Amino acid sequence: MLKVSGLSVAYGGLQALAGVSLEVAEGEFVAIVGPNGAGKSTLMKAVAGGVSLAAGSIEYRGQDIGGLPSHARARLGIAHVPEGRKVFPSLTVLENLEMGSYRPAARRRRADGLDTVFGLFPVLRERRDQLAGSLSGGEQQMLALGRGLMAQPDLLLLDEPSQGLGPRIVEGIFEAIAAIRKSHRVTILLVEQRVVEALELCDRGYVLETGRVVLGGDRETLLADPRVQHAYLGT
Amino acid sequence: MPLGDLVQYVVTGLLVGGVYALMSIGLALIFGVMKVVNFAQGDFMMLGMYLTYFLAVGYGVDPLLGALLTIPPFFVLGLLVHRTLLVRVTGGGNPQRLMDAQLILTLGLSLIITNATTMILTPMPRGIQTAYATQAFAVGPILMNQARSYAFLMALVLAGLVYVFLTRTDVGKALRAAADEPEAAGYQGIDVRAMHGLAFGVGIALVAAAGGLLATYHPIEPTVAVNFIVLMFVAVVLGGLGSIPGAFAGGLVIGLVQSLTLLVLPFQLQNAGVFIAFLLVLYLRPQGLFGQRLRAV
Amino acid sequence: MAAVPASRLRGLAPIGLVVLLGLVLTFALGERYHHRVLTLVFVWATMGLSWNIISGYAGQTSFGHQAFFGVGAYVTVLLIVGFRLTPWLGLMVGTVAAVVAAALIGFPTFRLAGIYFALATLAYPLILRIFMDFLGYQEVAIPMVRDRPALYMQFTDPRAYDLLALAALAGTLLLSHWIETSRLGYALRALKENEQAAEASGVDTFRAKMIALMLSAAPAAVIGAIYAHAILYVVTPDAVFGVLVIVQTLVVCLVGGVGTKWGPVLGAAIMVPMSETLDATIGDRLPGIQGVVYGAALVLVMLFAPEGIYWRLRALLPARRAAPAGAAAATEGPIAADLAGRAPVVRGATLMDVRGVSKAFLGLHALEEVSFTVRAGEILGVIGPNGAGKTTLFNVLNGFLSPDQGEVRYRDARITGLRPSAICRSGVGRTFQVVRSFPQMTVLENVMVGAFVHETTPHRARQRALAALASVGLEARADVVPSGLTTPDLRLMELARCLATAPDLILLDEPLAGLARDGVETVMALVRRVRDGGVTVVIIEHTMYAVVQLVDRLVVLDHGRRVAEGLPGEVVRDPAVIEAYLGKRWLRHVEGLRT
């Protein structure tokens, strides 16, 4: 479904990605783990259209999307839940969710989408008329996830959903991701620092280090590989 | 001073402030979505005054209706100006240099419009004669100029429509989303560049309509923009840069300040009060009188 | 006294040529009208140069610079009207008044950034204009003085006004030249390109901007007074505070090129004769043609040549041959610390003491009660996952942020509350997570900005900067601009800039980010050499494997709290640390693998 080949991105004079290649098949759940500064978020932005490519290509369902702007990619069914949540702070919770279903294909199924999201995160229903900027970090993350689901996406990109959240909230977020995975037939590409949580959820994973894929394999292989810890701690 | 006089000044100020408010929300919408301060906003207002004038003189269209008729052509004009000029100075790059480029570009545009209008239509001031310009409604001892009252009501209605558009329609919400977090808006399928064009078109149409309303009681001349563009800046800063309800309130406040200044200061210093208030707000409450900062830095 | 370096004198020759050309034109032209145009060219070139000081060199784009022009004109003329004071003296009073006005305006306005600054500058001439109207100075005619015309700047020979304006232009060119080649000029260019990096490199940006504004007000006032006598005869608020004054200023600068003394001169030489000719030929039939031309010039310049003619032409010249590229040879041995007059601190004694520092952003606790000490001569690592508060901590240490609670002491003195530039000058240097260079300055000039902390002349600063570049092995790249450097070389340049400030403590924010393994080795070796020379190092790093090899001690942050401190070998085995990095479940997972 998604095929990234030889992808390089540079910005601010720094080479963030250097020749990354990976594939995600229809219906798969793929995780990308690696320490900070490895280029994980840049990779996600590159797929979603948030940064321009220095080299390489991105194919989505056989179409080269490397040159498309982000809104055109969203309309093809790619939903990106960005790092740092990036909810619309001066819009209400409900309006944020409505914007998730802005693309015509999702707009028609808005009511269904809202039911699903409110079922998954009841707190969002309670706060539907509150400004998103006044939510707590965990609630904003739920909103960002919900907004991504509202797009009725075929490919869901999740960028560091646990970042900056307390341990209990993180657990809730991962449970929600597991539930999404179970109830929706959506392909997921997840970027996470928290290795086990990410790897346990996924079918396959990649380890990214200083802009390069250093390891790839299925869940069991990666969980048992000592090089994963080495990438983080050097021990 | 008798209370009646004070009420009269307040009412007069609010009536004028309503039209300022409508002008200012156009500027605020453009700034909110595009982060562009449009120096040429006053000149589009001036063009709106002239269009209303020629509709009135040439075709006998009542200026209150004429003001509404300016909306479609100026919306299209705004889209064109955005597409041909502003797209080239919005988007990526060093924010400070980009801002300078935008300010200078729109300043240049403003000069071209003012002076080309002078060349074509001569500097001679013109006015629209209407029956209601010289009559007043009397509410008890308070007198309300009819032209200003109608203009105030229409400004209120137009501002209300903008508010409904921004809060009740998907496109309006998308405009606000693009203003809040352009990057994330793109990820939702919102074409941010198209939203910029829409904001510019609507912003220009609103200020042109406000010009049409102003034309019912204010002389029309090519240099009229200078007197109003700064008032619009002040209103928008008072309301918190980019906030639309804030700009509306800011416009009303300016009308009030102008009117009440006359109670204590001579006529020539009417706008000095406005500008000093502007500087104080910039120094002390850059987020505006009513705004609060949602996020740090 | 030190001799003025030859390079500085060499820059004076073109100024002499321009003045000579001006003199030739003054005496060659015959028609009165041509002299008027020539005077106007000098006037707008001077006004453009004046604007260029604050908006070009310092990058603080002002839309209200005509305030000073008008103050000069009004003060001079009102002194003649009121006291029969000769304008030769009145002009000086006007200049002083404008400089005072600049100080009064700058003090509140430089606290504003970006669009707020630009909008505030709009208001000043408007307010002055309203008050001039109010005071009844709508039209102030210069009284004719028939007995001693020269004493009252009233000449019948138009060449006299050419010479007067040319003298102002020459003086302003010299002032601009001095700024370009002085410590102030480097400070202004640096703060224009990256204010935070300038401040962190020891530039007191507020002071530099104030000086620039006050310096720029003086020529504006002088030329305003001359303009009143040479052209106006009747001073009105609109003629000296009006929009057209700032517009003509902007046009000559933007067309010619901003940030160089030649831009406004070129721009005035092209634009003024053109618009005057248009005005003289078709201005009667088409009033406003001048405004259209100026407006079109602004629009076209912004669309097609935003850098202006001067920079366009310069880019056409063959580029200076760059020094041979390639990775610089790594040098050996410690990089000796420069105490720059500070007392030495015993190795191992407390150099910096962080006491209970807390910082919150809108309820989010970025730092909570963080305390630790930095000992002289060590490399201390600060690690922690993303969002742990590491960069916020550095921003508190170097003065970008002031903590909500707690304090930072350095050499037994409180530094909390000082400006970052003052903290830098006291010996605490820093680098940034994403390198903050001054992109339009060469590598050498980037480093010179730091060197000016302890040097006053460019010559000495250059020597110091070259020494710093040599110590990191980058002297071969001294003359390229930062965009021509590789990522590791950029890191080295930033480190050299920091070392040039003669620090005894440096804060390195992720110096290894984005580097491949060999780059990591280079930078790590350098950090060790810096420490061996006697400079204490605090380093933020994510790449743990590098950090454990490099540092003497580690402090671990998680969610804004210090969760561990100690020797690197122990800290990486601390369960709290592993949890912070990899999550609680990883711990359980690892235990599962072991059994």
Image (cartoon, grey):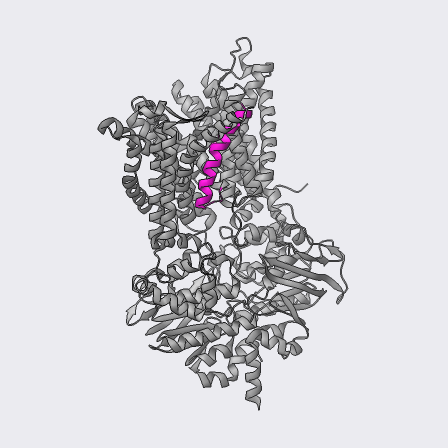
Left or right of B48 in this view: C533: right
- Can the viewer see residue C170? no
**Nearer to us in this view, C474 or C16:** C474
The region drawn magenta spans B239-265
Task: Tell me where residue C71 appears, x and y as whole percent.
Answer: 55, 26
The chief SS type of the magenta part is: helix
Left or right of A94 in this view: B83: left
Task: Tell me where residue A208 appears, x and y as whole percent.
Answer: 46, 74
Picture quarter containing residue C578?
bottom right
Locate the C terminus of chain A by quadrant.
bottom right
The verdict on residue C274 being magenta is: no
Residue drawn where x is 46% and y is 64% of the image: A124
**Nearer to us in this view, C560 or B270:** B270
Question: Eyeballing the image, is C498 above or below C41?
Answer: below
Residue drawn where x is 23% and y is 27% of the image: B58
Residue drawn where x is 40% and y is 37% of the image: B23
The furthest residue to the bottom: C595
**Nearer to us in this view, A117 or C433:** A117
Task: Tell me where residue C80 appears, x and y as whole percent.
Answer: 57, 16
The verdict on residue B247 being magenta is: yes
Picture quarter containing residue C295?
top left
Question: Eyeballing the image, is B120 above or below A198?
Answer: above
- Can the viewer see residue A42? yes
Locate the N terminus of chain A by quadrant.
bottom left
